[in-house]
Amino acid sequence: RRILMEMGFEEMPTSKWVESSFWNFDALFQPQSHPARDAHDTFFMKSPALCNSVPEEYYQVVKRTHEDGGNTGSIGYGCNF
């Protein structure tokens, strides 16, 4: 938080201070090994170590889409999620 505030960012009124990489990258179908993920400011938190759970059905849809395209007509990224 301090780093971002020092860079000129301002806080928005919200109860969600941290988003997991699932919602920031995976749910947007950015491959897990894609170099564009490195270009984003990603901070890894010690506490909480885990994010709120992702609904299992939605997680499976995202996983299948990454791996083999799911039911989208795509071939997916062809790697384990």
Image (cartoon, grey):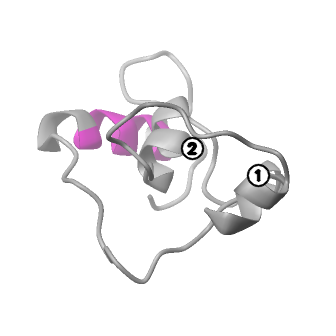
Q: Is residue 70 left or right of residue 29?
A: left
12 in magenta: no
The local secondary structure at tag 2 comes to loop
The local secondary structure at tag 1 comes to loop
| The N terminus sits in image quarter | bottom right
Q: Nearer the viewer, residue 52 or 36?
A: 52
Q: Amino acid at mark 1?
A: His
63 in magenta: yes
- Looking at the rendering, the stretch of residues picked out in magenta corresponds to 59-67
For disc 1, the neighbor class at 10 Å (few under 14, some 14 to 19, many from 20) is: few
- Label whose residue precedes the other's in the sequence (1 or 2): 2
Q: Which residue is mark 1?
A: 40
Residue found at the very far bottom of the displayed protein: 46
Q: Quadrant of residue 81?
A: bottom left
Residue drawn at x 25%, y 42% is 60
Circles 1 and 2, Cβ within 8 Å, touching? The answer is yes
Q: Nearer the viewer, residue 23 or 49?
A: 49
Q: Position of residue 32 (x, y in %)?
A: 60, 56
Q: Amino acid at mark 2?
A: Phe
Q: Is residue 17 left or right of residue 5?
A: left
Q: Nearer the viewer, residue 63 or 28?
A: 28
Q: Position of residue 44 (x, y in %)?
A: 54, 73
Residue drawn at x 85%, y 54% is 7
Do we see residue 59 in this rendering? yes
Can you tell which of label 1 and label 2 is closer to the viewer?
A: 1
Relative to 1, does residue 62 appear above or below in the rendering?
above
Q: Position of residue 65 (x, y in %)?
A: 43, 34
Q: Which residue is mark 2?
A: 25
